[in-house]
Image (tube, rainbow, N blue to C red):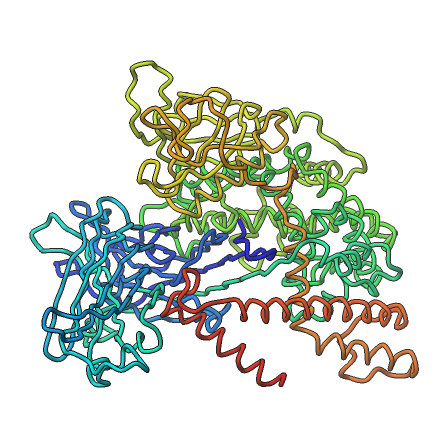
């Protein structure tokens, strides 16, 4: 979900690795240990939670989280909680990284000190304020000034203990006075509309002159200020909670008698600063925050066309896509956007076939085929991750869930055996698990996605042609991906492939490691199986699997998934689970006198229907066939005073649902929109608010069947396989080329050097693969021209935005540090260009 900004779409995403915490304060009880978990929050809104690590002051989490960020935010925060069985879980401390500081820690493991959490550290939100100074002549003829302070509204105030009933106090303060006034309390909203005006008399008369109506004494203005404090009206005996403040000196009225601006709320000056930051321990994090600024599609045509014809360039090493792999520091960073772009336009199979064939020609030993981290290997890995995720889940998830739930001991290393465990029993448990997983994999060939099968077919053909004397190379070329790089890593770390919600416990993790090693060896078809293990106990265990039937099963499976033209007609008919989870829904009023209340339900979406159930595993209480979904849209918060609501519109009524957070709401809206995109009766207009008390809240139309009053959002492209934005991926590729421009220029030099001088290569050029210097030079020239044109467009957009943007506007309130940095950078750029 992109934010539109004058023809340019802005996408934000974040990828986080939550490592571990250390030296947490001990619990004030006999055990001293704590049961801790960590949450990820956009400002205050929780979007992810780790598992609970019990009885530890140095908990290891090892969890990854990725999300598209659907709204603006100021802080990315991490809270460490201590679970309490009887009371509300207590917060030990937090790490809050300002948005503008995220680049400092980009993709680096960093230890952050935990900070104390109090009212001042939780301040967030913004206030819209107007000031007006007017002249008043009193009954005695003395000229005084009256200050009108209008507090218009606030947005994004913090929620305290699950509620927000805000009010504001407005104070005119100076050395000898402090006069305070208070707004009404606004119930159950963190976006209150106050629209109240307060009047203050500036009591000291000023010297009146015709030059300036407000030529009052310098010291008075400098020492007077308006202070606005936001509070949460609490019913508790502890008093109202502080939400934030702002201070405005009256000297802002020197230039003009009126002043209006948005402000970010700030903590109090006397906030708790004296607490030592190292009292609470620390948290290890790795954060990658990405912001993509994407123009309309026609801007990207020259670069995109160059990339899409890469498969047809002879030799392929002279293509734009291959050049991207050559200049990037890591092949992975080139492979991710490349594969997504090529998949979106249906060009991934010919390109991978071409680069894999080129790599096979350069390979001397059939035993090392596709073992390096080449561009071909990384592109195939990425394609399997994108196109094969559903296949992976269908194949492995039942077996992995059984292993996690049954929790049988499987340790076969005699040194690591626990007291009371029996080696033979453990070996038998492990053998049963390996058999279960092995059969799940080798019987899944018919479900393997077509795009993967087409790639495997080209690998098999290229390898067999290159090494005609080796009958097994046709199998090892495919197994080196499907077993070593797809199934084995997923068994080893199921949480990274969404097969389990969290990192598994140590015993299960050890069991999965042993299974992964065995499956990897079974799939590799190596001549001497036992010799491939460093550990003697693994070689002993592997004797169970030395029967010919295992090798035959692997070969049959590899034959099936690398056959040309293999298609599975049944795969479209079987329902595919797309998403499931717990949400809150409003009763639809299907019964005439039924209660229209809110209830938690388990929701399940397949490519056939959208259902909800009383709890997971129960029979559905209600089902909406996909063809009956006419639109999926956000529901305005004012409808039920509830955040993160959306509506699934059917022919007879709308189903109103509340997701747990903004990220989850976006995910559900996106996938429901995508799966119903091709419905013939999709609506073009809808009601953004609910139908309550006999009318629509948005347009006041009295009929519940009145046509919508707002146009439906476009939703996602109707791509059955994947949701990929081709322009966004091209923008990412442009950013990579732009950041490696010096390498592109060096590669041009290398082409010139090779064309003119055909002797030994200069060392600085030897890192590049250049098979045809003239073709490569021609492509490089086109790439550099395309990247330069886009760079100019970005620079022009920044200049135009800089001219139009107002500091103190709703988008850039006063106190917005990221905007202040932006102004400084633009000023430096302008000065430099002058």
Q: Is 674 left, or right, of 422 in this rendering? A: right
Image coords of residue 671 (percent x, y): 54, 38
Q: Is 416 left, or right, of 572 in this rendering? A: left
Count of marks placed on residues = 0
Image coords of residue 22 (percent x, y): 31, 67
Q: Which of 505 and 382 is in front in this view?
A: 382
Quarter of the figure with residue 673:
top right
Quarter of the figure with residue 791:
bottom right
Q: Which residue is drawn at 31% across and 75% down?
A: 252
Residue 589 versus residue 468 in the image, above or below: above
Residue 564 versus residue 538 in the image, above or below: above
Q: In which quarter of the image is the C terminus?
A: bottom right
Q: Which residue is drawn at 89% across and 68% down?
A: 775
Q: Which of 823 and 194 is in front in this view?
A: 194
Q: Is 572 left, or right, of 658 in this rendering? A: right
Taking the view exactly as shown, the residue that stands out farthest to the left is 237
């Amino acid at each position: 979900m992109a934010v539109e900004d004058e023809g340019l779409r802005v996408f934000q995403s974040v990828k986080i690795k939550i490592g571990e915490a250390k030296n947490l304060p001990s619990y004030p009880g006999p055990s001293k240990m704590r049961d801790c978990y960590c949450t990820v929050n956009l400002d205050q809104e929780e979007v992810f939670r780790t598992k609970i690590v019990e009885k530890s002051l140095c908990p290891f989490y090892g969890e990854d989280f990725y999300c598209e960020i659907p709204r603006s935010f100021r802080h990315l925060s991490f809270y460490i909680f201590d679970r309490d069985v009887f009371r509300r879980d207590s917060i030990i401390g937090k790490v809050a990284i300002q948005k503008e500081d995220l680049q400092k820690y980009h993709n680096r493991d960093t230890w952050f000190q935990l900070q104390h959490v109090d009212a001042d550290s939780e301040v967030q939100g913004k206030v819209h304020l107007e000031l007006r100074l007017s002249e008043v002549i009193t009954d005695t003829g003395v000229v005084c000034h009256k200050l009108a302070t209008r507090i218009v509204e606030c947005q994004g105030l913090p929620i305290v203990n699950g509620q927000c009933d805000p009010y504001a106090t407005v104070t005119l303060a100076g050395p000898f006075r402090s006069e305070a006034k208070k707004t009404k309390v606004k119930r159950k909203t963190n976006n209150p509309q106050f629209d109240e005006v307060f009047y203050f008399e500036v009591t000291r008369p000023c010297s009146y002159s015709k030059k300036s109506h407000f030529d009052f004494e310098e010291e008075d203005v400098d020492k007077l200020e308006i202070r606005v404090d936001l509070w949460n009206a609490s019913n508790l005996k502890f008093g109202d909670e502080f939400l934030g403040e702002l201070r405005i000196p009256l000297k802002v009225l020197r230039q003009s008698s009126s002043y209006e601006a948005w402000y970010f709320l700030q903590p109090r000056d006397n906030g708790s600063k004296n607490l030592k930051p190292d009292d609470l321990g620390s948290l290890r994090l790795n954060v990658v925050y990405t912001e993509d600024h994407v123009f309309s599609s026609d801007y990207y045509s020259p670069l995109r066309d160059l990339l899409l014809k890469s498969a047809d360039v002879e030799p392929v090493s002279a293509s734009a896509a291959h050049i991207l792999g050559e200049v990037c520091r890591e092949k992975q960073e080139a492979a991710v956007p490349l594969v997504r772009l090529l998949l979106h336009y249906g060009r991934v199979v010919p390109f991978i076939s071409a680069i894999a064939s080129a790599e096979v020609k350069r390979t001397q030993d059939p035993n090392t085929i596709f073992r390096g981290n080449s561009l071909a290997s990384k592109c195939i890995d990425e394609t399997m991750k994108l196109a094969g995720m559903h296949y992976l889940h269908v194949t492995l998830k039942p077996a992995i869930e059984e292993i996690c739930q049954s929790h049988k001991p499987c340790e076969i290393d005699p040194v690591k055996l626990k007291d009371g465990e029996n080696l033979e029993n453990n070996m038998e448990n492990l053998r049963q698990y390996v058999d279960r997983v092995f059969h799940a994999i080798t019987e899944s060939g018919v479900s393997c996605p077509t795009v993967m099968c087409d790639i495997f077919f080209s690998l098999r053909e290229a390898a067999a042609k290159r090494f005609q004397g080796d009958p097994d190379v046709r199998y090892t070329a495919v197994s080196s991906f499907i077993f070593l790089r797809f199934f084995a890593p997923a068994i080893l770390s199921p949480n990274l492939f969404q097969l389990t919600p969290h990192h598994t416990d140590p015993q299960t993790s050890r069991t999965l490691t042993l299974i992964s090693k065995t499956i990897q060896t079974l799939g590799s078809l190596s001549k001497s199986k036992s010799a491939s293990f460093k550990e003697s106990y693994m070689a002993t265990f592997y004797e169970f699997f030395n029967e010919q039937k295992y090798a035959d099963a692997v070969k049959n499976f590899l034959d099936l998934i690398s056959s040309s033209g293999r298609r599975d007609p049944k795969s479209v008919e079987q329902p595919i689970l797309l998403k499931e989870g717990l949400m809150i829904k409003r009763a639809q009023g299907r019964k005439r006198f039924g209660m229209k209340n809110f209830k938690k339900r388990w929701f399940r979406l397949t490519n056939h229907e959208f259902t909800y159930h009383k709890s997971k595993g129960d029979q559905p209480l209600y089902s909406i066939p996909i063809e009956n979904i006419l639109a999926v849209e956000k529901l305005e918060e004012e409808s039920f005073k509830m955040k993160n609501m959306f509506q699934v519109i059917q022919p007879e009524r709308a189903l109103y649902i509340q997701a747990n957070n903004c990220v989850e709401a976006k995910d559900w809206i996106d996938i429901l929109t995508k799966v119903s995109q091709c419905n013939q009766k999709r609506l073009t207009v809808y009601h953004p608010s609910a139908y309550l008390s006999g009318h629509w809240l948005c347009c006041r139309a009295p009929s519940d069947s009145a046509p919508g009053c707002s146009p439906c959002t476009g939703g996602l492209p109707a791509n059955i396989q994947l949701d990929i934005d081709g322009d966004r991926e091209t923008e990412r590729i442009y950013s990579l080329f732009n950041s490696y421009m010096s390498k592109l220029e060096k590669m041009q030099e290398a082409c010139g050097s090779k064309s003119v001088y055909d002797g030994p290569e200069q060392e600085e050029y030897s890192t590049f693969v250049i098979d045809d210097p003239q073709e490569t030079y021609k492509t490089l020239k086109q790439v550099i021209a395309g990247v330069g044109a886009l760079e100019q467009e970005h620079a022009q957009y920044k200049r135009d935005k800089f001219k139009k943007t107002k500091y103190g506007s709703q988008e850039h309130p006063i106190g917005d540090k990221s905007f202040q940095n932006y102004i400084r950078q633009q000023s430096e750029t302008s000065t430099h260009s002058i």
